[in-house]
Image: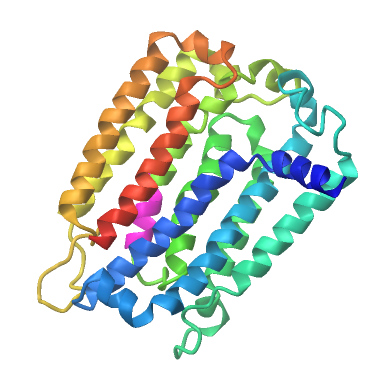
Amino acid sequence: MIARKLDLYWRFARPFTLLPPLLGMISGAISAIGAVAAHRGHSFFEEIGARGLFHAKFIAIGSLMAAALNAASNILNQWTDLANDRVNKPARPLPAGEVTVKETIALFAALYAASLAAAYLVTPLAGEPGLGFLGTHQCFLIAALGAIGTFVYSAHPFRTKRWAWPAQLTISIPRGMLLKVCGWSCVATVFADVEPWYIGLVFLLFLVGASATKDFADMKGDAAAGCRTLPVRYGPRSAARQIAPFFVVPWLLLPLGIVIRRGDIDGDGIGDPILSGNPVLLVGLGTALVAYGLYTVRGILRDPDELARTENHPSWTHMYRMMMIAQIGFGLAYVF
């Protein structure tokens, strides 16, 4: 009985969607280790050799925090989308009656609390002078902002999910921008460095358009519940054209981040690029993702109406694959 209930709750959390935030936190932290090592004039592996266990502790806590926060957001969204899902996804646990509303509220409340408690424990900068509470608990601050963002997207009185592009921006900030910055904060400060925010901007721009692929198949229920998502407001064809550039353009920021210079970080008297990862790998990653994005866009624009007829359209799968490829690619570029 207990095992069956736990399995139900696991399905309720939508486990497939928990992998990208988990990878995002790990990738962000690995990128921070590589950047810190580069600024200190040594390799990633030398940094790991000196402080590997110290970094690993906070990265592990932060990664579990991100997965718990995403699960909380998923369950909250299913509660606030109950009217939508009765039409769009009646087999989900809540509209199917497998879990109650009280269970749902208790689950997402517990997961939000657990994720923020975990974030509070991520303090890699503890003991450094002059930082204060916010400087020491940067991960907690960013995670709290992300949690607020997911609430604003899903729940009343805000529920920005009702408003097309504002909905896209609201969900892409916590799941794109803040996720990468939060991962970075498991290792180093994010308040005095533009690099984690630039990386976060890449993922924000991708998700602000690409995450709308999930809304096309839900048009009927969303419209009935008063959610004017992009495909509901503009129709599948116009919405597909609007989101298409976001599968391609963000990845152009990778080579641009190598060209644009900032201040001298490593003390060699030369301005450093915004992205301190391996330039060859970053350009290769950007090129590969642009090509993948163009391939995905071709499928989207060839038959936009198919997006609204297929529950798990290939473009939705491609969106998640692109996210994971980008996360892994960024990590490798800062390791080597």
Q: Nearer the viewer, residue 199 or 110?
A: 110
Q: Is residue 56 above or below residue 95?
A: below
Residue at (39% x, 36% y) in the render: 322
Query: The C terminus appears in which quarter of the rendering?
Result: bottom left
x and y percentages locating residue 165 in the rendered image: 53, 32
> Where is residue 96 shown, x and y percent of the image?
83, 27
**Observer-nearest residue: 92 or 125?**
92
Q: Which residues are the magenta region?
A: 195-202
Does the magenta portion include 198? yes
Residue beneath the point at 56% across and 27% down: 214
Q: Residue at x 22, y 37 (%)?
A: 287
Residue 4 within the magenta-colored segment of the rendering: no
Q: In the rendering, at what x and y percent does residue 328 appear?
A: 36, 49
Dominant secondary structure, magenta: helix
> Residue 197: image x %, image y %?
38, 58
Residue 34, by quadrant, is: bottom left
Which corner quadrant holds the N terminus? top right
Q: Is residue 13 left or right of residue 109?
A: left
